[in-house]
Image (cartoon, rainbow, N blue to C red):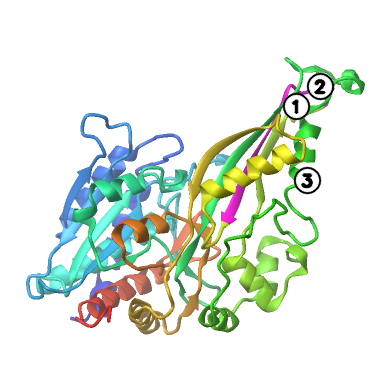
Amino acid sequence: MTIDSLVDAGMNDLISDLQALIRQPSVSAKKVGLVECANLVAKMMQKAGINSEVLYLDDDDKTVPPIVYGEVKSRANPAAKTLLFYNHYDVQPEEPLELWEDEPFSGTVKDNKVFGRGSADDKGELITRIKAVEYFLKETGDVPCNIKFMVEGEEEVGSVHVEQYLKKYEEKLACDGVIWEFGYVDAKDRPIISLGMKGLLYVELIATGPSRDAHSSLAVLIENPAWRLVSALSTMRDEKSGRVTIKDWYKEVRPFTKQELAVISREPFDEGEFKNEYGIRRFVAGARGKDAKKALVGMPTCNIAGFDSGYIGEGAKTVLPARARAKIDFRLVPGMVPERQLARLKRHLKDHGFSDIQVNFIHGEAAARTPISDPFVKKVDEAARKAFGSSIRSVSSAGTGPMYSFVKVLKAPCISVGSTYMFARIHSPNEFARIDLLNKCTKCMGRIIEKFAAQDTLG
């Protein structure tokens, strides 16, 4: 049987296994169900014929969520290249519960969709990788190339320990190429092959005022920390252009290469459909066409992720709050170092008279980008075109993940390709995975494995 017929015949089993994964809550932000889900993933790998282990950073201290390691060595082709699938078993919190049409961890199937937290991000993606390997083993008892899996449990909280895991198990995880944990499919069912990810600097800013909440009539004498924080935030970004106004913020940014600009110009992007989906009328700075695409894949950002202060309940409460807090995320691009950007942020606040505002570092991640010329790119693209009918190359995802750590430690190219429909409501209520795309993605993974087996895969 061909990989296509094997996938088609096994779809009921794939959906059943995905439902089992969804029904096991694994919320890293709440530290709920992580070990249980890791054990479930390891069990599914074993059932598929993949040797698996649940590994900890410290066997005597199991407070850090474990990774699941899987491996299958090719008996017929032991000298083949090694392909690593990186995924994660943790999911976002399910709130707000009242907006779910079905239970968040139900795995409900309706028509062509499987609903539930993690159905797309990332349990749906993970199951396509496991099943692709399983189908080879069931049909031939072997795999065309060496296969490894690394499935972590902290991706949704910033992959806090992933680099430590990579360094501790560097020899075990050694590989020649990495298929990333997700990949978007656009509105016309074309997989987007992403060659990189933006970096991230995530901070918390806190302004303090009086020793306790005060009556708002005292605002004539007591400075409100919320206004203080708003004033500070307004110095960090130009409203018209959207550019970050912190000194030297763009100093090390690497410009797009000619190859990258060519890919960006060819990448389709339906501005009207995008705006309609998110209910907006214009993009930041009125960006259009190529400028909008360049911004999405390769421009830094300064975003207020959250702001809280005072009273925001029902009715009125005339209060002058004692504290104001904002969560800020800065998306970074190649050349930008999170620690250096953090130092610039702190210096900016000091130079603008806001040295009293407390800056708490939460997370930092550098950007990574695989060169378009890498032979791995062509192999993945060919597999995606065969499975989906067409494909789109993208210079980088607009999102962030620990790709830089993989490139730095394992020294292997990383490419994102997968089954996640771009409007699948990931991180939101009623998240879903499309069954037809899970089918195509599993076929794509099988073809990537086949193409990776060739000795000339990486040049």
Report the front residue among 167 and 457: 167
| Measured Cα–Cα span from mark 2 to mark 3 | 23 Å
Give the x, y percent position of residue 169: 23, 49
Which residues, given as a range, are shown in magenta?
A: 316-331
How many C-alpha atoms fall within 10 Å of the one at disc 3: few (<14), some, or many (≥20)? few
How many C-alpha atoms fall within 10 Å of the one at disc 1: few (<14), some, or many (≥20)? few
Q: Which mark is residue 234?
A: 3
| Measured Cα–Cα span from mark 2 to mark 1 | 7 Å
Give the x, y percent position of residue 364: 50, 47
Most frequent secondary structure within the magenta stretch: strand
Element on which disc 2 rests: strand
Q: CB under 8 Å between callouts 2 and 1?
A: yes
Q: Is residue 298 left or right of residue 61?
A: right
Element on which disc 3 rests: helix
Report the front residue among 55 and 17: 55
Q: Quadrant of residue 433?
A: bottom left
Q: Quadrant of the N terminus?
A: bottom left
Residue displayed at 60% across by 82% down: 265
Can residue 309 be seen here? The reply is yes
Q: Amino acid at mark 2?
A: Val
Q: Amino acid at mark 3?
A: Ser
Q: Which mark is residue 311?
A: 1
Q: Answer above or below: position of 457 versus 59.
A: below
Report the front residue among 19 and 175: 175
Q: Amino acid at mark 1?
A: Tyr
| Measured Cα–Cα span from mark 1 to mark 3 | 22 Å
Please state which of the two labelled residues, at mark 2 or mark 3, is closer to the viewer.
3
Element on which disc 1 rests: loop
Give the x, y percent position of residue 253: 58, 63
Q: Is residue 66 left or right of residue 237?
A: left
